[in-house]
Image (cartoon, grey):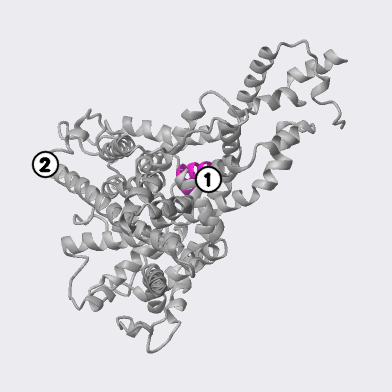
Amino acid sequence: MKMKKFREGLSNTSSTLGIIGIVIFCLAPFYWMFVSSIRPATKIFETSLWPSDVSFENYGAVFDPSRGFGRALLNSVIVAGTTTVLALIVATFTAYALARLEFRGKTLILTVIVATSMFPIVAIVVPLLQLFTDIGWINTYQAMILPSLSFALPLAVWNLHSFFRQMPVELEQAAMIDGCTPGQAFRKIIMPLAAPGVFTTAIIVFISAWNEFMIAVTMVNDQAMQTAPVAISKFGGVSQFETPYGSQMAAGIVVTIPLVILVLIFQRRIVAGLAAGGVK
Amino acid sequence: MSTSRTTTTRPDAIAPRAQRRDSARRQSRLAWMLVAPTILIITIVVIFPTLTAVYQSLFGVKGIDPETGFVNDTAPFVGLQNYANMFIGESGARFWNAASNTTIFALLTVTLETILGVTMALIMHRAMRGRGLVRAAILVPWAIPTAVSAILWKWIFDAHGAANALLGTQILWATSDIPAKMAIIVADTWKTAPFIGLLTLAGLQVIPDEVYEAAKIDGANAWQRFRRITLPLVKPALVVAVLFRLLDALRMFDLPYILIGARKGSVETLSMLVQDEASNLRYGSAAAYALMLFAYVFLIAFAFIKVAGAEVIGAEEKKKIPLRQLFVNSRLPWKRSRKAQEEVA
């Protein structure tokens, strides 16, 4: 009896230690970003765990009008937002058809969608860059939004597909027996019930579109059209040899905080969505 | 709208089999209508550019023609020259370096991530308290944009940064070959190991406790239970997670591009090479490299699915009640139901 208690205690302690280990592993670098962002520029190379002087001058520097970071944030919101909305509208219908309807060529379409999500984006960037150069789309929103659909759309279809499949088919059966057309059943019964799934998918797609870098850095060379991740990576220092880590860390915090808040609020749903989309 | 006109009012004249065929056709037409926009977009943004790339890869660079001395307005046709250049000379060396970097990164990061991820999942699965906290923490590296995490790790791996302070070393991470590679591997593992952990945890949670209890009664120790029960049962979930991560790692771009820099041989990946060629307007060779990367990714995916037996599409459950039945029985706005209405009238 004593032995059992001891073992239980040991296993509890080790699992607690494990949990602490995971939390530190995940959060320590993020914490370092935050601490560095509130160090004054002169003490940026300090390596103490908490800054001796706390200063928000880096945040001031990030939003200095000459840097155009506010504009970059706006660009990111426009590009990631439009990508998400477009992908979701198109994906909802497709995912419903794939989850519920019987038709020839379904497996082929599913395969194409999965294959697309594994596709190296850089392979489409080259021809699209040339095309967009020819038609004068360089430095436009559509030049970033359209290629972003190449990963956003398959992601959205795949996620929604698994959500629709989890919903009992009896719902539509009942609705249609009561005289609904399939369209009505979809609109009046399925959509309201699928709303949480659509919302979760929206968050996941938005985060991946918000994080997109390669397309944005290739299709845009005008500073005013840069998205936030590109803008941060291109922050210059006073001289060519100095990297302005303080303001980069502050900008990193600014770009990440909305996502971290989203993730903390909707963590349960996001985990369910990722598990459904990633494993099934 | 009357809802009374349901299944019973339909004429019995139509043979059941014809009904079924008709409804299948109607269902299939609706399905294709719903699927069409997705197919259209994928064609525009994926299939069409890929085919264009194949064509593009056969052309050289605009510029002075070495034979005539005139300036070309159009890119000259060079046949398979771009592909041949991958294997020889200076461009060949750069290609092979990028290909080996890509492979090393993919192999090492995915191996590390899988080991760490599975360990994390096992810890989380057993934990009684603090699950919510861990779940939130684990999503943070995933949610941070790769570009931002690259800058964060660049800062950590700065000569005056936290890594050197912590290790008591004075390594110039960014400028030396092996340390630069290590920095990339550490940063990538940090960002995605939690993600593998999350997916594995989802797989673990569907294993019923009874299985473990039975094994315990049969005298299996912890290691045996892990090897014989946990691993096989969690394998399907894990294999798909690893496959997706592997393909993701093969197209790595942001992290080395920002952490170390563009055109740095120590960490240049195939994606970086393609992007660099394209932004220097060498579309032909960029397209050829891109297709090579595409072929490589495809090959790995194919081999992995064959060897590990990943079920990506997932077997459709057959017991699903066919919706076909509903299409026959419900009132529909399509032609046939109108015809049926006329017949009734």
Residue at the front extreme?
A1
Q: Amino acid at mark 1?
A: Asn
Judge the density around disc 1: few (<14), some (14-19), many (≥20) Cα neighbours within 10 Å. many
Q: Is residue A155 magenta?
A: yes
Residue B122 locus on image (x, y percent): 39, 59
Residue A73 locus on image (x, y percent): 50, 63
Q: Which residues are magenta?
A: A142-158
Q: Kindly identify which numbered label has been placed on residue B333.
A: none
Foreground residue among A19 and B273: A19
Predominant SS along the magenta part: helix
Check the residue under mark 2 and report the chain it is in: B
Q: Mark 1 and mark 2 in contact? Answer it, CB < 8 Å.
A: no
The residue singled out by tag 2 in the image is: B89
Q: Kindly identify which numbered label has been placed on residue A159.
A: 1
Q: Is residue A164 magenta?
A: no
Residue B68 locus on image (x, y percent): 17, 31
| Residue A246 figure quarter | bottom left
Q: Is residue A140 visible?
A: no
Q: Amino acid at mark 2?
A: Gly
* Residue in the picture at 46% in, 49% down: A144
Foreground residue among B154 and B75: B154
| Residue B54 figure quarter | top left
Check the residue under mark 1 and report the chain it is in: A
Residue B224 locus on image (x, y percent): 31, 53
